[in-house]
Image: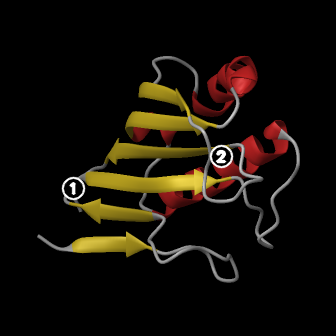
């Protein structure tokens, strides 16, 4: 079985990884942080969340999927105080119900000290 990789978009500064990897009918999406297309990281949680969703949906779209194909999502936050805002924004971005299975963790830090969150996930795709 071959693996199809989805690299970061051109110009986006990223560590050595694929934004997504498709194996059979599963798409594994790497933890996507809130960087914008120019590599900038906004100061607000809401702006970072919007960038995460844009980049996350881009990977899904490139694989021929939508948020309705998500089976599992992991959300990493650096501040417990952002959980309520995340739940509201998450419902708007990944809804309506039923939502994918989800784990939300508050972590001490992410790779860039300004990163407030990242989201990773697994989607089930139609066989190609």
5 left or right, relative to 12: left
Q: Quadrant of residue 108?
A: top right
Numbered label tally: 2
Give the residue pinned by disc 1. 127
- Point 82% across, 37% down: residue: 46
N-term-proximal mark, 2 vs 1? 2
Residue 37 location (% of width, % of height): 76, 69
Residue 53 is tagged as 2
9 to the left or right of 103: right
Residue 92 pos. (x, y %): 69, 26
Q: CA distance from mark 2 to mark 1?
A: 25 Å
Q: Position of residue 79 (x, y in %)?
A: 70, 30
Q: Is residue 42 visible?
A: yes
Nearer to us in this view, 79 or 128: 79
- The C terminus - image quarter: bottom left
| Above or below: residue 109 compared with residue 55 | above
**Of marks 2 and 1, the one in the foreground:** 2
Q: Position of residue 57 (x, y in %)?
A: 58, 51
Q: Nearest the camera: 47 or 78? A: 78
Assign a secondary structure to mark 1.
Answer: loop
Quadrant of the rendered image containing residue 22: bottom left
Q: Is residue 88 left or right of residue 95?
A: right
Mark 2 Cα-neighbour bin, 10 Å: few <14, some 14–19, many ≥20:
many
Mark 2–mark 1 CB contact (< 8 Å): no
- The picture quadrant where one finds residue 91 is top right
State the residue in front, 108 or 86: 108
SS under mark 2: helix
Residue at x-position 47% and y-position 46% = 120
Q: Residue furthest right?
A: 43
Neighbour tally class for label 1: few under 14, some 14-19, many 20 plus, Cα within 10 Å: few
């Amino acid at each position: 079985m071959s693996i199809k990789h989805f690299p970061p978009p051109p110009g986006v500064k990223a560590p050595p990884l694929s934004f997504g990897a498709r194996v059979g009918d599963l798409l594994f999406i790497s933890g996507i942080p809130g960087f914008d297309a120019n590599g900038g990281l906004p100061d607000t949680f809401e702006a970072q969340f919007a960038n995460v969703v844009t980049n996350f949906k881009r990977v899904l779209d490139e694989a021929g999927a939508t948020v309705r194909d998500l089976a599992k999502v992991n959300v990493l936050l650096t501040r417990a105080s952002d959980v309520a805002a995340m739940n509201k924004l998450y419902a708007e971005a990944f809804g309506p119900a039923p939502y994918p299975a989800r784990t939300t963790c508050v972590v001490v830090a992410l790779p860039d000290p300004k990163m407030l969150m990242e989201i990773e996930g697994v989607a089930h795709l139609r066989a190609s």
